[in-house]
Image (cartoon, rainbow, N blue to C red):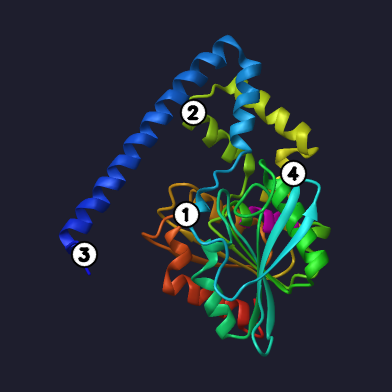
């Protein structure tokens, strides 16, 4: 029987660097093609460019396909929606202390919570996470912030009530807005991790990345608002923040390259009862597996009297 020697540590590091460089090169190549295409279409056929931009903006990448379809020990349940089935994952400890709902970010999935879930279970928290429409193992192809909000409300209504909700990135923005509507009824505390405070700024950053001019960006925004029957300004924390009256923990890294730390300050200024945790050097995703950040989240969730 033949045995194969494992590659040495230096060889593994070289392979990892090569794969990273290859991925970066492919990404930059695709980005350059998209930029040139949008630059031309924005000037020649702006309406078509706006439609194409909207489709790209509302179509998440299912990068999670390289991960297992379920997390260890999860009970899997599907909820039927007009956009397709909504895949939910649940964990129940022997004695339930709190009920926690997790909302992942854009192009994410329930697996992004793999480091937080065991910590919550150890503290007696029942946990439920769902793959939003267009993400993970759920149905559908397209989604947006209103989609996240409506799916959060559906889960709270059909599988809740949950007393705590935690959201990352766009999921955090959905949590923030939901708390000012009927979708957020029943929650007693919330955690927003690396959440964008204004979806219009997200649209602007998207347009700037792809060299989409202001005219096409505004057309795309109007199409987005028409599709979801919701003005983007109403989804900004400046429009709803004063209506959120439960304690909220805000967690954000100072070097987050996807959602600037300015968004943290916008939340902190608008929410009546915020608690702020700033990290450094973790970025947008590594914050979800940092021991100190996760410990702070669990402490906030499980502390009986917050006294904020």
Per the image, label 3 sits on a secondary structure element best described as: loop
User: Would you name the residue on which mark 3 appears?
Assistant: 4
Q: How many marks?
A: 4
Highlighted magenta segment, given as a residue range: 172-179
Please state if 46 lies on the left or on the right of 17 as rendered. right
What is the C-alpha distance between the residues marked 3 and 2? 46 Å
Residue 139 percent location from the top left of the image: 69, 49
Magenta stretch: dominant secondary structure:
helix
Q: Earlier in the sequence, mark 1 or mark 3?
A: 3
Query: Residue reaching furthest top?
Result: 44
> Where is 1 relative to 39, above or below?
below
Mark pair 1, 2: CA separation = 27 Å
Do the numbered discs 3 and 4 sit on residues whose CB atoms are within 8 Å? no
Q: CA distance from mark 4 to mark 1?
A: 36 Å
- Above-or-below relation of 182 to 135: below
How far apart in space, not on screen, are marks 3 and 4 (Cα)?
59 Å
- Mark identifier at residue 210: 2
- 36 in the magenta segment: no
First of labels 4, 1 by sequence position: 1
| Spatial CA span between label 2 and label 4 | 25 Å
Judge by depth and name the residue closer to the eye, 262 or 182. Answer: 182
């Amino acid at each position: 029987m033949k045995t194969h020697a494992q590659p040495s540590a230096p060889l593994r590091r070289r392979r990892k660097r090569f794969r990273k460089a290859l991925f970066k090169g492919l990404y930059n190549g695709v980005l350059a093609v998209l930029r040139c295409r949008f630059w031309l279409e924005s000037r020649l056929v702006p309406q078509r460019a706006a439609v194409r931009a909207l489709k790209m903006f509302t179509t998440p990448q299912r990068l999670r396909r390289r991960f297992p379809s379920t997390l260890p020990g999860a009970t899997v349940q599907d909820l039927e929606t007009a956009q397709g089935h909504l895949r939910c994952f649940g964990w129940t400890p022997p004695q339930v202390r709190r009920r926690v709902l997790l909302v992942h970010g854009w192009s994410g999935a329930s697996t992004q919570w793999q480091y937080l879930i065991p910590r919550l279970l150890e503290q007696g928290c029942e946990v439920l996470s769902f793959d939003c429409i267009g993400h993970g193992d759920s149905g559908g192809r397209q989604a947006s912030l209103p989609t996240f909000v409506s799916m959060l409300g559906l889960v709270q209504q059909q599988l809740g009530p949950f007393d705590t909700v935690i959201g990352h990135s766009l999921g955090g923005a959905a949590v923030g807005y939901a708390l000012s509507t009927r979708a957020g009824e029943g929650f007693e505390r919330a955690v927003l991790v690396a959440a964008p405070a204004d979806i219009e700024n997200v649209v602007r950053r998207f347009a700037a990345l792809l060299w989409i001019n202001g005219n096409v960006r505004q057309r795309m925004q109007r199409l987005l608002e028409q599709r979801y029957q919701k003005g983007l300004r109403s989804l900004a924390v400046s429009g709803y923040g004063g209506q959120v009256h439960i304690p909220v923990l805000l967690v954000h890294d100072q070097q987050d390259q996807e959602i600037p730390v300015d968004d943290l300050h916008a939340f902190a200024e608008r929410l009546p009862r915020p608690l702020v945790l700033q990290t450094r050097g973790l970025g947008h995703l590594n914050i979800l597996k940092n021991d100190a950040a996760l410990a702070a989240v669990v402490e906030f969730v499980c502390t009986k009297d917050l006294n904020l």
